């Protein structure tokens, strides 16, 4: 019985048609077929664009950096946040203590940096600035008006590259009674123009008053420069 049953089973197995045998595809052709299938645009129509992929990569790096910092900082993320707050408070304290960052002057300190204008033109411009409360600009133009007025009266030799201090020193030699006030307004001009300090109404009033007085001041003829004539 047993032998006969095994023989019958073996006969049925040998008699199985070829269609029932599982199909086995070689590994390399199968991989190539899968790659061809996945290269179909239908599978990539929702993929992020190159910019989005770059941003994703960047944020992953930033996240990894902060995560690593949090793991090495006492207290983890809370400790890292506390350090960030301390740095921010320190920056605010330094800003309040030192004031606004002043830009490095890009000029050599010359009094005039634009196209030539007359003393009256600078004076009118200064008055407009003053009327609108722009004291820094008013001081700058009034100082230029003062110096040009002295040049126009030949009390100063023309000097396009002259600084406010140089003009005040030379004018103080021709008008010794005003030497101290001339140096004061020259320092005010430098502070406003190159030192980053805001102009004030009081400083402008002092400069404007000196400019008005100098229009009628009598020079010391022994030290007054003469304009060269060609």
Image (cartoon, helix red, strand yellow):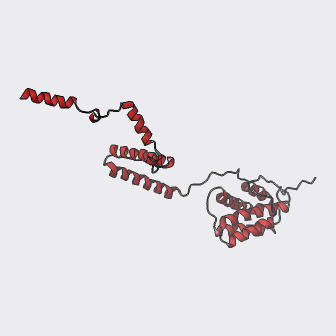
Determine whether 28 is above or below 229 in the image: above
Outermost residue toward the left?
A: 1
**Image quadrant where one finds the N terminus:** top left
Q: Nearer the viewer, residue 95 or 227?
A: 95
Q: Quadrant of residue 37?
A: top left
The reply, left or right, for residue 43 in relation to residue 151 is left
Q: Quadrant of residue 7?
A: top left
Determine whether 77 is above or below 143 in the image: above
Label tally: 0
Q: Nearer the viewer, residue 39 or 68?
A: 39
Q: Nearer the viewer, residue 119 or 203?
A: 119
The residue lying at 92 percent from left, 54 percent from top is: 229
The residue lying at 70 percent from left, 59 percent from top is: 186
The reply, left or right, for residue 146 in relation to residue 191 is right
Q: Indicate the position of residue 70 as horizontal and vertical percent values.
A: 35, 46
The reply, left or right, for residue 196 in relation to residue 155 is left
Q: Nearer the viewer, residue 100 or 14?
A: 14
Q: Indicate the position of residue 89 as horizontal and vertical percent values.
A: 43, 56
Q: Quadrant of residue 17?
A: top left
The reply, left or right, for residue 131 in relation to residue 47 is right
Q: Indicate the position of residue 112 as horizontal and vertical percent values.
A: 75, 57
């Amino acid at each position: 019985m047993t032998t006969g049953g095994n023989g019958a089973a073996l006969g049925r197995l040998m008699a199985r048609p070829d269609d029932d045998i599982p199909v086995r595809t070689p590994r390399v052709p199968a991989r190539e077929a899968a790659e061809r299938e996945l290269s179909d645009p239908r599978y990539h129509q929702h993929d992020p664009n190159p910019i989005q992929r770059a941003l994703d990569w960047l944020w992953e790096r930033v996240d990894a950096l902060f995560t690593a910092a949090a793991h090495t900082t006492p207290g983890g993320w809370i400790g890292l946040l506390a350090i960030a707050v301390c740095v921010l408070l320190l920056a605010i304290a330094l800003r309040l203590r030192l004031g606004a960052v002043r830009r490095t002057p890009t000029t050599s300190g010359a009094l005039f940096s634009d196209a030539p204008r007359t003393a009256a033109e600078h004076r009118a411009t200064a008055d407009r600035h003053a009327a609108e409360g722009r004291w820094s600009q008013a001081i700058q133009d009034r100082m230029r008006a003062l110096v040009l007025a002295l040049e126009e009266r030949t009390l100063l030799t023309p000097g396009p590259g002259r600084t406010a201090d140089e003009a005040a020193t030379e004018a103080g030699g021709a008008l010794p009674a005003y030497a101290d006030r001339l140096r004061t307004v020259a320092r005010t001009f430098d502070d406003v123009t190159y030192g980053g300090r805001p102009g004030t109404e009081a400083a402008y009033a002092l400069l404007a008053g000196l400019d008005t007085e100098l229009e009628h001041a009598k020079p010391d003829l022994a030290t007054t420069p003469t304009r060269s004539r060609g």
